[in-house]
Image (cartoon, rainbow, N blue to C red):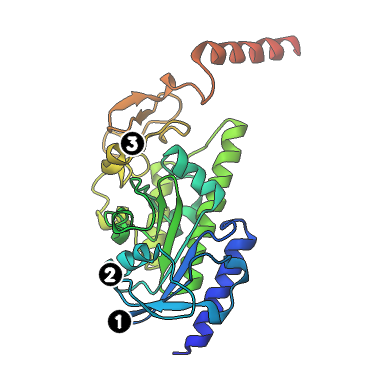
């Protein structure tokens, strides 16, 4: 193993997250496991966009520093918690991509069944409960999710993604933030169009053929409600996650027959079905929504 080359790659990933605005000032940290008990990591109090290989230090799997002239990052315990749960993981990237972090601050679950690339490469994305960063309690917040996904949103903090290579670990973060940006832009236009359950099943079948894991595949698809039956719904009450800006996609009934249109059901954070039509657009009360629709109808009639 060429340790110096890996340090160069860590610095390159650091430059990329800095240049994309995913890590301001000294935000973020990156790790790479080089043996069963040694992990390279970025140091604390350094801008990730301007690191040099000599800046990279190393720790053991308990977080004790083994080498380096700079002090190791205080959040390395988060990375180590992931690596202990996932022997296949060698690299972790933590940063604060602004669009994904907006969902972390709002505690808004990431909608599924919207973009093919996201369904294939990410799947359902969980949001952790909040803990003060740096300690073991913070690191432990990811434990319920680590084996079911490769990217996690950290409540009121940022994201962490991980994989077999540094490039792969970084990719998950870039895909997620691009997706969150698209969602926010589409929401400003006023509409999110979801896949049908059959279209989602086709994407999951493709994912299976590619050898990619997905909790919805591992569950055996015993629940036909692929889109709105979120894999991580059971953690929402504990983490303060609830749908506020993005309603659930239309869910199927009658053993897979999908309800289409405005009559489809949504669910609240506790999993209770609620009519989608009873949920006005974010930022509008019902009276304002009715008035806006009336104005559009009158304008259309005036133009006839």
Horizontal and vertical percent position of residue 101: 50, 47
Residue identified by numbered label 2 = 84
Q: Secondary structure at mark 1?
A: loop
Vertical side of 262 occupied by 286: above or below: above
Residue drawn 41% across the image and 66% down it:
162
Horizontal and vertical percent position of residue 95: 50, 58
**As drawn, which residue projects farthest toward the bottom?**
1
Number of labelled discs? Answer: 3
**Pointers 3 and 1 in contact (C-beta within 8 Å):** no
**Pointers 3 and 2 in contact (C-beta within 8 Å):** no
Residue identified by numbered label 3 = 257
Q: CA distance from mark 3 to mark 2?
A: 42 Å
**As drawn, which residue projects farthest toward the right?**
303
Q: CA distance from mark 1 to mark 2?
A: 10 Å
Q: Secondary structure at mark 2?
A: helix
Residue drawn 41% across the image and 60% down it:
206
Q: Secondary structure at mark 3?
A: strand
**Pointers 1 and 2 in contact (C-beta within 8 Å):** no
Residue identified by numbered label 1 = 36
Which of the 4 quarters of the picture holds residue 138? Answer: bottom left
Identify the mark nearer the N-term, 3 or 2. Answer: 2
């Amino acid at each position: 193993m060429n340790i110096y080359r890996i340090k160069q790659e860590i610095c390159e990933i650091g430059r990329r997250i800095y240049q994309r605005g995913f890590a301001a000032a000294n935000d973020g940290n990156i790790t790479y496991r080089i043996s069963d008990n040694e992990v390279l990591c970025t140091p604390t109090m350094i801008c990730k966009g301007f690191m040099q290989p000599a800046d990279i230090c190393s720790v053991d799997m308990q977080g004790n520093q083994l080498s380096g002239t700079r002090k190791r990052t205080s959040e390395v315990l988060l990375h180590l918690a992931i690596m202990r749960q996932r022997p296949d993981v060698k690299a972790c990237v933590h940063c604060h991509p602004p669009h994904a972090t907006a969902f972390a601050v709002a505690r808004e679950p990431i909608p599924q069944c919207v973009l093919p690339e996201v369904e294939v490469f990410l799947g359902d994305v969980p949001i952790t409960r909040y803990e003060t960063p740096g300690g073991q309690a913070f690191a432990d917040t990811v434990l319920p999710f680590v084996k079911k996904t490769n990217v996690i949103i950290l409540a009121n903090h940022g994201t962490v993604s991980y994989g077999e290579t540094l490039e792969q670990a970084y990719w998950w973060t870039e895909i997620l933030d691009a997706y969150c940006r698209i969602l926010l832009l589409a929401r400003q236009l006023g509409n999110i169009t979801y896949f049908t359950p059959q279209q989602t099943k086709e994407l999951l079948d493709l994912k299976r053929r590619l050898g990619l894991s997905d909790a919805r595949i591992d569950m055996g698809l015993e629940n036909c409600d692929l889109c709105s039956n979120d894999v991580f719904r059971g953690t929402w009450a504990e983490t303060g996650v609830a749908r506020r800006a993005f309603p659930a996609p239309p869910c199927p009934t009658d053993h897979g027959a999908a309800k289409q249109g405005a009559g489809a059901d949504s669910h609240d954070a506790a999993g209770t079905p609620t009519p989608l039509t009873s949920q006005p657009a974010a930022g509008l009360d019902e009276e304002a929504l009715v008035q806006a629709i009336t104005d559009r109808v009158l304008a259309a009639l005036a133009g006839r």
